[in-house]
Amino acid sequence: MDHLLSDRIRRVTESQTLVMTKKARELSAQGVHVINLSIGEPDFGTPDHIIQAAHEALDAGYTKYPPVTGYADLREAISEKFRKENGLDYTAEQIVVSSGAKHSIMNVIMSLVNQGDEVIIPAPYWVSYTEMVKLAGGVPVILHSSIENNYQFDPDELRKVLNRRSKLFLFSSPCNPSGTVFHKDFLDSVANVLAQHPDILVVSDEIYEHIQYTGKHISIGTNPKLKDRVITVNGVSKGFAMTGWRIGYIGAPLWVAKACEKLQGQFTSGANSIAQRATLAALTQTLAPTKQMNKTFKKRRDFVVKALEQIPGIVPNKPEGAFYVFPDVSVYFGKMWGDKVIHNSLDLCLYLLDVGHVSLVSGSAFGNPECVRISYAASMEDLKEAMKRMEEALAKLTP
């Protein structure tokens, strides 16, 4: 009966991160000790003061439908957060709270992209960007990069692809999957290009803002050349270890925010009421647990990068943010395991799962097929064992 499915859903491919996570869980259910480095989720618990705020919200009776755009005091807090931490001027009216940053991005795309509109996306990119664009009837236009330039695209290439069909420029910094942080000079060069095309809007995904090792986070929305054209996406999943709470938000031009409110009102209405009250605590109280988590991630990054450098042929990058390493593993393409050929990074990931019992994600899911994504959101004990297993498994491959 699947012939009755819509063309819309047929255009979309399943998330490879979720596919690999599912395969890892299936093996684990069979009694295999799988180390899962495929999922983009902090391994820390939500800080106690945030959990306490949720308990207090329950006791206070926050169990009714919330406003579609979010509670007024939370939107005021987000507006203040943008102003103080990011130098961005969004009023509370320009804030829309949604069920995760993924939901926020989908709201924006569905509100802005028409059939045939082009959305420019630098690679590597988060797996869902291209599929979201396809769902809206848009066309993803990919800007390629490589490990040699630290996964930063050439702004001149951006200039070349812009045309009358271009609608959005969508990117993340820190980047999932590469961990690349786009610094001010680079963002300014991008803004200089986009400034020549006033009808193109920018969607800046900053969900990993608090997980970066370079100092102060820079938002492209602070560039005056892009005033009133930037939609800033953020949330609490990564920086506050609140993935299951499902709260994201945007700051946007008022007309975009109102469009997202209209769309969200027909799809989901307001985000979870208790999670919103917990988010208010996350954004207005101490950042000490977040800062400690960031220090731990940095130590893990340093370990994983050094360990990968010891594995023959792997070329790791040194990410400046998020909790992923995105090494080039193409040296193993064409090698053999028995009578099976490792044709690409997906084959390699499946091999490492079956033989090494380590779960990674193919770089093809992110637009760079010569790479794999390794999450270091895992204990140091697991990371040490995973690197050992990977090295041993890869050594078994033959030319």
Image: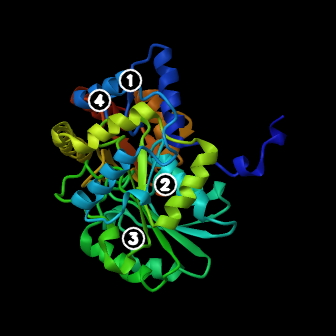
Location of residue 388 in the rendering, given as x and y in whole percent from the top left corner: 28, 31
Give amino acid for label 4: Ala
Q: Mark 4 points at which residue?
A: 53
What whole-number distance in Å separates the C-alpha atoms at marks 3 and 1?
47 Å
The residue labelled by disc 2 is 369
Circle 1 sits on which residue?
A: 58
Residue that badge 3 annotates: 153
Q: Residue 184 carries which label?
A: none
- Left of 216 or right of it: where is 257? right
Question: Looking at the image, can residue 242 be seen?
Answer: no
Instruction: Check disc 3 and give the amino acid type.
Output: Phe
- Answer left or right for 89 relative to 166: left
Q: Quadrant of the C terminus?
A: top left
Kindly tell me whether residue 195 is visible in this rendering: yes
Q: Please state which of the two labelled residues, at mark 4 or mark 3, is closer to the viewer.
A: 4
Q: Which residue is drawn at 62% across and 44% down?
A: 267
Of 7 and 115, nearer the camera is 115
Marks 4 and 3, the one that precedes in the sequence: 4
Mark 2 or mark 3: name the one nearer the start of the chain: 3
